[in-house]
């Protein structure tokens, strides 16, 4: 009989990380709060470099605020679950079709 793995429990991916990385503490803040608190004096610094397009911490946080406002305006509140997709994620159907060609 085949044993079913539970990746979220067994964490088999940890073998690819150093011991230091496995033992590192995880911040108890949200990502947003962590970025805001740790970059208050560097809002012009580059947060992301996406294929040559540099996005500053200031822009990143402003866009996150805009997205939060849009979610709130749509009636989404704390605790709600939201699915998101980006323009770079192609629908599953398209991927299968292109694989057949």
Image (cartoon, grey):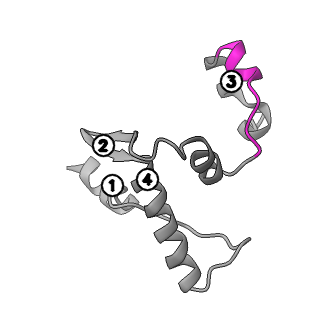
Circles 1 and 3, Cβ within 8 Å, touching? The answer is no
Judged from the image, the secondary structure of the residue bearing numbered disc 2 is strand
The part of the chain drawn in magenta is: 18-28
Spot occupied by residue 4 in the image (x, y as percentages of width and height)? 76, 37
Query: Which residue sits at x=72%, y=48%?
Result: 29
Circles 1 and 2, Cβ within 8 Å, touching? The answer is no
* In this view, 76 is above or below 39: below
Magenta segment: does it hold 95?
A: no
| Tag nearer the camera, 1 or 2 | 2
Q: Circle 3 is placed at which residue position?
A: 14
Mark 4 to mark 3 CA distance (whole Å): 33 Å
Q: Earlier in the sequence, mark 1 or mark 4?
A: 4
Label 4 crowding class (10 Å Cα cut-off): few <14, some 14-19, many 20+?
some
Mark 1 to mark 4 CA distance (whole Å): 23 Å
Mark 3 to mark 2 CA distance (whole Å): 31 Å
Q: Earlier in the sequence, mark 1 or mark 3?
A: 3
- The answer to which quarter of the image holds residue 59 is bottom left
Query: Which residue sits at x=54%, y=43%?
Result: 39
Q: Earlier in the sequence, mark 4 or mark 3?
A: 3
Res 88 label? 1
Res 58 label? 4
Q: Earlier in the sequence, mark 3 or mark 2?
A: 3
Q: Circle 2 is placed at which residue position?
A: 54
Circles 1 and 4, Cβ within 8 Å, touching? The answer is no
């Amino acid at each position: 009989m085949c044993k079913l793995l539970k990746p979220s429990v067994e964490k088999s991916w940890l073998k690819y990380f150093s011991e230091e990385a496995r033992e590192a503490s995880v911040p108890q803040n949200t990502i947003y709060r962590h970025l805001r608190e740790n970059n208050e004096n560097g809002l012009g610094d580059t947060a992301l470099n996406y294929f040559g397009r540099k996005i500053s911490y200031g822009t990143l946080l402003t866009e996150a605020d805009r997205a939060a406002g849009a979610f709130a305006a749509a009636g989404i509140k704390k605790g709600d679950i939201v699915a998101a997709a980006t323009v770079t994620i192609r629908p599953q159907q398209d991927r299968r079709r292109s694989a057949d060609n």
